Amino acid sequence: MKKVGIIMGSDSDLPVVEKAINTLKEFEVPFEVHVFSAHRTPVEAKEFSANARENGFGVIIAAAGMAAHLAGAVAANTTLPVIGIPIKSQNLGGMEALLSTVQMPSGIPVATVAIDGAVNAALLAIEMLSLSEPVLEKKLADKRAADTAKVLEKNAGIENKYNN
């Protein structure tokens, strides 16, 4: 199975990124985690991205806040799918990261999830890998069924309490 590369621009992004890590662990998807900054370690970020396919990666998740050029810098150096996680900031609430991540020029796509949307980034990566890994497709279907059951159980409780 291909690995998921997870890159964060700073270790301060780890509390958000850990949600993606935990989701990948839940699905038993192999991954590696790195701290590479588009601005402070551009050479290392480029080398990781340029060699990711040859190193067994199938998808890269890039999380960054503020200027948030990491996902775009990664995408510019690989043809693998890149998923950007804009990280919430104190100054603008993550809107600057969202716009920097989602507003990519034609030719260099970055799939972008919600601000701090690490779980969805991991699930999207798993969906991408499931195209060639039927076991992941089954796990995704099972998770959806379990999530549906949880909501329906909560619905039944609300109905029983208020619809008498």
Image (spheres, helix red, strand yellow):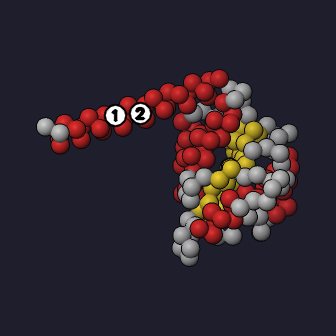
Q: Are marks 1 and 2 in contact (CB under 8 Å)?
A: yes
22 or 143: nearer the eye?
143
- Residue 14 position, x and y percent, is 59, 57
Mark 2: few/some/many CA within 10 Å (<14, 14-19, 20+)? few
- Residue 4 position, x and y percent, is 70, 41
Q: Residue at x 19, y 36 (%)?
A: 160
- Residue 24 position, x and y percent, is 59, 39
> Dividing the picture into quarters, in which one does residue 10 lie?
bottom right
Identity of the amino acid at label 2? Answer: Thr
Identity of the amino acid at label 1? Answer: Leu
43 or 105: nearer the eye?
105
| Label 1: which secondary element | helix
Mark number, residue 135: none
Which residue is labeled 1 in the image? 152
Q: For the N terminus, which image quadrant?
A: top right
| Label 2: which secondary element | helix
Q: Residue at x 54, y 36 (%)?
A: 26
95 or 40: nearer the eye?
95
Which residue is labeled 2 in the image? 148
